[in-house]
Image: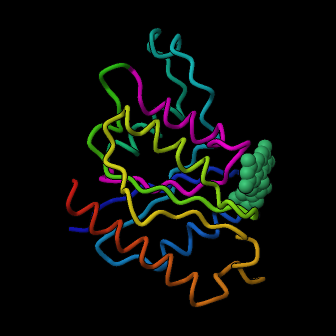
């Protein structure tokens, strides 16, 4: 049985480099992984009052139900101001509550960050990892993926334009398949 993986993309913009890299990772993955993108742009900012009142917004419920059914999560994200974008942090927060019902517990994860800058989203990558520690998510330690100079690694068709980068992506997603098999 293939392992089910939700893909969380930190950028909401239409031409997102990270969304393109996410599609490339999915295309290069082995058949032992089955992916679905979990949209996070419509999740209202977390407010515990809505859970306490038993009136969570419909997108929170949809997201929680979708994530509850997967074995693993692939985070593909830009860096915003040396940290993760609020989209990702909010999705992590929404999934972590109500208390005792976190959908994160025991899942496998991998974190991939891409930036047009030189540092490849290192700060975002590690801020995501930091939150996942507290949620008992088994995050793949290596290979790490900080993709710098990302705009130049994609062609006008939105596909990776060179073999070296394609190889990095293939190694990353194959390692994640092995990691998920071992940890879920
Ligand atoms: C950025 N960007 C950015 N890049 C980076 O390498 N380190 C950073 O700390 C930041 N900070 C930052 C903050 C905000 C609010 C924005 C909008 C952007 C630039 C960012 O990497 C660039 O816009 C990417 O193209 C965003 O990823 P997507 O949308 O292409 O996937």
Do we see residue 13 in this rendering? no
Q: Residue furthest bottom?
A: 163
> In this rendering, is residue 157 above or below 37?
below
Instruction: Classify residue 76 by image quadrant.
Output: bottom right
Instruction: Classify residue 6 by image quadrant.
Output: bottom left
Identify which residue, 38 or 30, lies in the foreground: 30
Q: Residue furthest front?
A: 119
Give the image location of residue 139, x and y in percent. 36, 50
> In this rendering, is residue 65 above or below 72?
above
* Left or right: 150, with 46 as reference point: right
Identify which residue, 95 or 81, lies in the foreground: 81
* Left or right: 4, with 116 as reference point: left
Count of numbered circles in the view: 0
* Left or right: 164, with 153 as reference point: left
Q: Give the residues in magenta.
A: 70-98
Is 23 within the magenta?
no
> In this rendering, is residue 27 above or below 88?
below
Instruction: Classify residue 61 by image quadrant.
Output: top left
**Residue shown at 54%/35% (left/top)?**
59
**Residue shown at 62%/50% (left/top)?**
10
* Left or right: 119, with 131 as reference point: right
Give the image location of residue 178, x and y in percent. 27, 68
Is 72 within the magenta?
yes
Q: How is the image coloured?
A: rainbow
Identify which residue, 55 or 147, lies in the foreground: 147
Q: Quadrant of the N terminus?
A: bottom left
**Residue shown at 47%/63% (left/top)?**
144
Give the image location of residue 68, x and y in percent. 33, 42
Do we see residue 5 in this rendering? yes
**Residue shown at 75%/72% (left/top)?**
151
Give the image location of residue 23, x and y in percent. 56, 71
């Amino acid at each position: 049985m293939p392992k089910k993986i939700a893909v969380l993309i930190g950028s909401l913009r239409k031409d997102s480099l990270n969304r393109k890299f996410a599609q490339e990772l999915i295309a290069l993955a082995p058949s032992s992984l089955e992916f679905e993108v979990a949209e996070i742009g419509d999740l209202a900012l977390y407010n515990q009052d809505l859970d306490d009142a038993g009136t969570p917004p419909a997108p929170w419920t949809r997201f929680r139900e979708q994530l509850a059914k997967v074995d693993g999560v692939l985070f593909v994200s830009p860096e915003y101001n040396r940290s993760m974008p609020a989209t990702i942090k909010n999705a992590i927060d929404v999934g972590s509550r109500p208390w005792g019902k976190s959908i994160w517990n025991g899942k496998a994860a991998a974190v991939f960050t891409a930036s047009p800058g030189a540092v490849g989203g290192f700060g975002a990558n590690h801020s995501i990892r930091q939150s996942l520690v507290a949620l008992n998510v088994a995050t793949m330690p290596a290979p790490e993926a900080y993709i710098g100079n990302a705009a130049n690694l994609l062609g006008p068709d939105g596909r990776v334009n060179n073999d070296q980068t394609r190889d990095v992506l293939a190694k990353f997603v194959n390692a994640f398949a092995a990691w998920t098999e071992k940890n879920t």
